[in-house]
Image: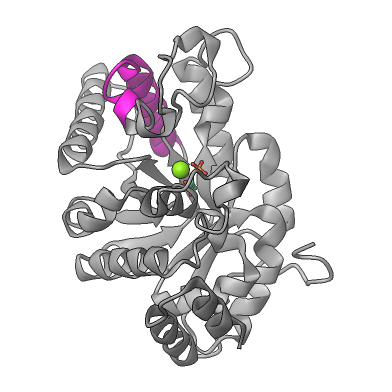
Amino acid sequence: TAGRDVTVREERVETRDGKEIEVAANIGTTAEIDGAIGQGADGVGLFRTEFLFLDRESPPDEDEQFETYVDALEAFPEGRVVVRTLDIGGDKPIPYLELPEEENPFLGDRGIRRSLGDDAHLFESQLRALLRAAGATDGTLSVMFPLVATVDELTAALDEVDRVAEDLADEGTEYAVPELGVMVETPAAVMMAEEFAERVDFLSIGTNDLAQYVMAADRENDAVAHLHNPQQPAVLRAIRRSVEAAHEHGAWIGMCGEMAGDPASTELLVGLGLDELSMSAVTVPAVKANITEIDSTDAAAVADQALTAATKQHVTDTIDQ
Ligand code: PEP
Ligand code: MG
């Protein structure tokens, strides 16, 4: 398996020519933090908070979430912790939320859509917990929104952060506004990446959903797995476009989908210009080891070559060379 026999590097890593790439872990619960630290993760690049809401009878309240986020921040005093706001939809059952039955749940009421709609009360308590946690520790908290497709959604989410901050200030509750970001998971987000990057601090590419929506191929359907593949040229071009938009507008950009943890893709991703890669903890050592062996000029050439490919096979051949 990936990561076997590879030395764990606790320190941050850079390419041979000195470009630092942040290598972070994806977690679902604080129980995974020790494992992430053990594998040398620099921080958390995706905290999937829906796991805090699953397998229980009622949602975690503000104080319970506050404790959880503080624990995560204190575990990485030097690193960044990127928390994604609740990302659920018709495909993940949470009995107490009474999610609608939908014909196409992946195209339905999920992600930020629910947070701005039926789950607005949960969004508010989660943001309160997050802003309080940012104020209560010295750690670096970043908060990002899932499945954003329009500037209006982003504006509404950012307005809600402002409103929550005002409430906390009025109450005299300690808080800080974290770094804010958008997940790039829809073709719409790729096309609007400039506008998003102007409005937030960072973008993070979710290749699992991005590949699903760019390729119109269900991420859970093996029959279309060849299409649902981040090495499809169409997906690569979407990644490149997002990176350029982010950097043009002074935002940093990471990747937290499965592709980020594929050691065979590390050089390509560094070449595409990603600043951060976040993955399941077990692949952190192998990806860190790869980064230390990469020359970023060579990597850029690999990426340019891969971007000329007309087929997935050509992309795979290019990165395997
Ligand atoms: C993604 O879509 O790539 C992602 C990281 O989010 P999730 O897998 O939780 O949908
Ligand atoms: Mg996703």
Compared with residue 43, is residue 124 higher up or lower down, i.e. above or below? above
Compared with residue 106, is residue 308 higher up or lower down, i.e. above or below? below
Name the outermost residue toward the front. Answer: 223
- In the rendered image, residue 28, in percent from the top left (x then y), is placed at 60, 37
Quarter residue 123 falls in? top left
Name the outermost residue toward the right. Answer: 5
- Is 152 situated left or right of 264 in this image? left
- Between 219 and 13, the one nearer to me in the picture: 219
Rendering colour mode: one colour
- In the rendered image, residue 22, in percent from the top left (x then y), is placed at 51, 66
Q: In percent of the image, x 46 and y 48: which residue is there? A: 217
Compared with residue 184, is residue 289 higher up or lower down, i.e. above or below? below
- Between 168 and 99, the one nearer to me in the picture: 99
Residue 76 shows up from this direction? no
Highlighted range, magenta:
113-136
Image quadrant containing the C terminus: bottom right
Compared with residue 135, is residue 262 higher up or lower down, i.e. above or below? below
Q: In percent of the image, x 32 and y 38: which residue is there? A: 176
Image quadrant containing the N terminus: bottom right
Does the magenta stretch mainly form a helix, a strand or a loop? Answer: helix
